[in-house]
Amino acid sequence: MALISTEMKENLNANAGGPGSAVNSLPDVGQRARRHVAWRLLPFVFLLYIVNYIDRVNVSFANLRMSADLGFTDAVYGMGVGAFYIGYVLFEIPGAVIVERWSARKWIARIMISWGLVSILTGFVHTAGQFYVIRFLLGVAEASFFPGMIVYLTHWFCVRDRSRAIACLYSAVPAASLVSSPLAGWLLGVHWRGLAGWRWLFILEGAPAIVIGVITVFYLTDWPAQARWLPQDEREWLAQELAAETRAKKKLRDHTIWQAFGDPRVLLLTTAWFVSLCGALGSIYWIPTFVKRISAASDRTVTTLLILPALIGVTCMLWNGWHSDKTGERRWHAAIPLLAAGFMFGLSVLTRQNAPLAVSCVLLGSGFYFGFQPVCWSMPTLILGESAAAATFGLINSMGQLGGFFGPKLIGFLNMRTHGVTASLGFIALAYLVAGSLMLSLRIRDPLQVAAEHAA
C-alpha cells in the first residue's frame, strides 16, 4: 500500500487510539480493538475506492483525445458523462439498504465485478448512442457502492472515529488522480493492436476492479461478531460500543425510513450535497479540458498538473476529518472547504486573462473542495441509526448525484454557448458558495452528548 501517505498512517493510528489521539482514556481492550480494525479495514477500503474512482472519471482524461477521434461535441460529451448518474440514482437507495440488511462484502464485490466489465466495454464505443448507453450501464453497475461503503464503516467505527474513517476512505478520490493522471498521460500517447490510447485507458483500468472484487468476498467481514481475526474480548467490546450508540439514538427518536426522508436536517444535507456535486462533478469531468484550454499545454503537461489538486485533496480530507473528530465540531469543518473552493474558482474567473494564475486557482479550488466530504458523511449517523441511516445515505447520495447529471451537462452547454470556459468556472464557484452557506445553516449534535444531558 505505497499509496498510503504518512498523514494517512497517522490517521489510522488516531482511529486506533494511537499517540496523540483524544481517546487514550479508553480501556486497553478498546484501544487494541480500534487499532486492529483500523489497520485491517481502512487500507483495503481505500484501495477499493481508488479503483472505483479511477474507473468512474477516467473518461475525463480520455476526452483529451476521445471526442476528437469520434467527432463528439462538448454537448455530446457532457450528456454522456451525465448519463452515468441516471443509472446510478435509480439503484442507489435499494443497494444501500441491501448492505445494511444482507451482506456488505458480497454486494460490494458484485458491484466491482460488474462495473469492471462495463468499464472495459467503454473502450470499444464508436458512436454517441453507444457512449450514452455504456455510461448509463456503468452508473447502474456502480450504484450504491459509495453509500454501501459508508454503511459498512458504521458497522465498525464508533461516532468518535467516524469522520477520520470516512476521510481515509474518501481520500482515495483525490489519491486516484495520483495514479490515473500519469497513467493517462502515458496511455494517451500509445497505439496498440489498432486501438487508440484512450481505448486502452478504459480496458486496462477496468480489469483491476474484477480481480479486487473477487478478493473482497474473502477479505472483508460484514460485522464485528463475525471477525475471527479479532480476539474475543475485542469483538465483544466493539459490538457493545456500537450497540450503545444505536440505543442512544433510539432513545432520542427512532426514525422509520420514510420519517428519515422527511427530516429537515436530512433534506438540508441532501440539498447541500446536490449543489456541491453540481460544481464538483462538473469540475472533475471537465478539469483536464479547462486546464488545457486555459493554458494551451500538452496532454502530458495537463495530466502532470492535475497531480496538484490530488495532493491538496488528500491532505485536506485527512486533516479536516481528524480535526473534526478531535473537536467534535462538524458544521464549520464542512462549510469552510466549500467556501474556500468557491472563492478560488471565483478568482479564476477574475484572472482568466492571466493563464498561470487562473490555472493555479482552478487547481487549488479543486483540491480544497475535498475537505468537505468526510465531515458531511459523518453527519447522517448523528441523526439516524441502522436501516434509516443506510437508506438516508442512499437518498442523500442519489439525489446529490443528480448534480453529476446536471453539472457536466450544463458546463457542456455553457462552453458551447459562450465559446469559452469563463461561464463554467463562474457556475462552479457559485455552486460551492451556495453549498457552503447551506452547511452553515445546519445544526446537528452528537447523540451520545444529548443522551447524557437528558440523563443528567
Image (tube, grey):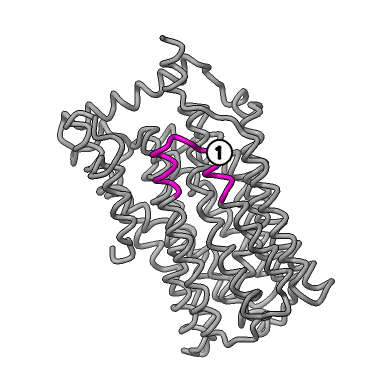
**80 and 383: which one is in front?**
383
Region of the chain picked out in magenta, as a range: 320-336
**361 and 376: which one is in front?**
361
- Mark 1, Cα crowd under 10 Å, few <14 / some 14-19 / many 20+, is many
Farthest residue, direction right = 417
Question: What type of secondary structure mainly makes up the magenta span?
Answer: helix
Q: Is residue 370 above or below residue 95?
A: below
Indicate left or right for 7 with 282 as reference.
left
Q: Quadrant of the C terminus?
A: top left
Which residue is depicted at the point 48% across and 75% down? 181
Which residue is depicted at the point 79% across and 67% down? 414
Q: Which amino acid type is marked by label 1? A: Arg
Which residue is depicted at the point 69% across and 70% down? 77
The residue labelled by disc 1 is 331
Task: Residue 324: say if magenta.
Answer: yes
Farthest residue, direction top = 456
Q: Position of residue 429 (x, y in %)?
A: 69, 59
Q: Is residue 89 above or below residue 138?
A: above
**321 and 69: which one is in front?**
321
Q: Position of residue 25 (x, y in %)?
A: 24, 30
Which residue is depicted at the point 55% across and 29% down? 444
* Mark 1 residue element: helix
Residue 424 position by quadrant: bottom right
Task: Residue 224: say if magenta.
Answer: no
Q: Quadrant of the N terminus?
A: bottom left
Residue 347 position by quadrant: bottom right
Q: Is residue 65 above or below residue 346?
A: below
Q: Position of residue 72 (x, y in %)?
A: 72, 77
Indicate left or right for 264 with 195 as reference.
right
Q: Position of residue 270 (x, y in %)?
A: 64, 40
**252 and 455: which one is in front?**
455
